[in-house]
Image (cartoon, helix red, strand yellow):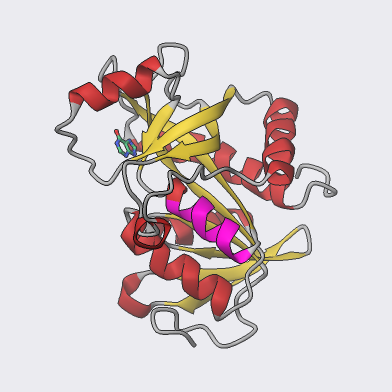
Amino acid sequence: MSLHIGAAEGDIAPTVLLPGDPLRAKWAAETFLDDVRQVNAVRGMLGFTGTWAGHPVTVQGSGMGMASLSIYVNELIRDYGVKRILRIGSCGAMQPHVGLRDVVLAQTASAVSTPSATILRELSFAPCADWGLLRAAARAAETRGTRHHVGGIYSSDTFYDERPDLTEQLIRHGTLAVEMEAAELYTLAARHGVQALAVLTVSDHLQTGAALDSGARERSFGDMVQIALSAAFPETPDI
Ligand code: HPA
């Protein structure tokens, strides 16, 4: 047990899929894993452990935003010895060539600030994905024929943005999409020497205002989960 995760030692797998939404954790575990059991319900932040192609996998909710994610990622790594964390979540597209339902593989994640800024101080650290996971995810997306993009994203502290000038600069610098968690995930993974990757599905478009309805969200999120699992276990044929 840790402060915010009630799982017994050994109930969390070395590989964790980390959606923001705890109900999406339940859906992903029940849809894609075998022999699923619930391992956490503290504060309703559900976690499940099962197997995928024989490999143990945990799917744990992180909540929204870097402050919440930081609690779960710290405890998963420090208290449960997790070695590989793949965020699965939604993002808002920032470039015209990035469409709804496309998958974005976040090579880097820029941020105005992260919870780690208190220790990094004046350093403008460059949070980046694990290369092995990123390469495997890109290959899995290619194999599946999923429209995907690899590049930089922006991890925002706010969903309701009041800085259109900043959005404009991010777009100008080629940022693919915005979400609210990856920069801190990558920073914590770097600090603790574990692998991390954010695999994101475009749920809305900042430039056109288009957004997926809930049915389309569920169908396209399945693709993202399969890509994340294939990236975590690249030696396993796609199932
Ligand atoms: N902003 C921040 N996070 C998001 C968005 C957005 O537009 N869409 C999905 N996650």
Residue 65 versus residue 200 in the image, above or below: below
Give the mark count. Answer: 0
Q: Is residue 40 above or below residue 175?
A: below
In the image: residue 97, left or right of residue 35: left
Nearer to me, 37 or 18:
18
Asked whether residue 27 is drawn in magenta, I would say no
Asked if the stretch drawn in magenta spans residue 185, the answer is: yes
Asked if residue 47 can be seen in this view, the reply is: yes
User: Which residue is drawn at the image coordinates 76% and 52% (left, top)?
Assistant: 233
Q: Please, which residue is most extreme toward the top here?
A: 96
| Left or right placement of residue 65 versus residue 104 in this view | left
232 up-or-down from 139: above or below: below
Please report the residue visible at 50 percent of the width from the left and 47 percent of the height from the top.
88
Q: Given the current orientation, which residue lies at the most extreme front position?
A: 122
Q: Position of residue 71 (x, y in %)?
A: 40, 69
Look at the image and give the residue range highlighted in magenta: 184-192
Q: Residue placed farthest to the left in the image?
A: 162
Q: x, y percentage for residue 60?
A: 49, 65
Q: Residue at x 46, y 62 (%)?
A: 26
Quadrant of the displayed image that contains ligand 1: top left
Residue depicted at 83% across the width and 44% down the height: 237
Q: Residue 191: x and y, percent?
A: 56, 62
Q: 61 or 170, which is in the foreground?
A: 170
In the depicted structure, whether residue 44 falls above or below residue 25: below
Question: Residue 20, how many percent across, how many down?
Answer: 39, 54
Predominant secondary structure, magenta span: helix
- Quick one: quadrant of the C terminus? top right
**Camera sees residue 30:** no
Q: Quadrant of residue 180?
A: top left
Closer-to-camera residue (100/166): 166
In the image, 177: left or right of 148? left
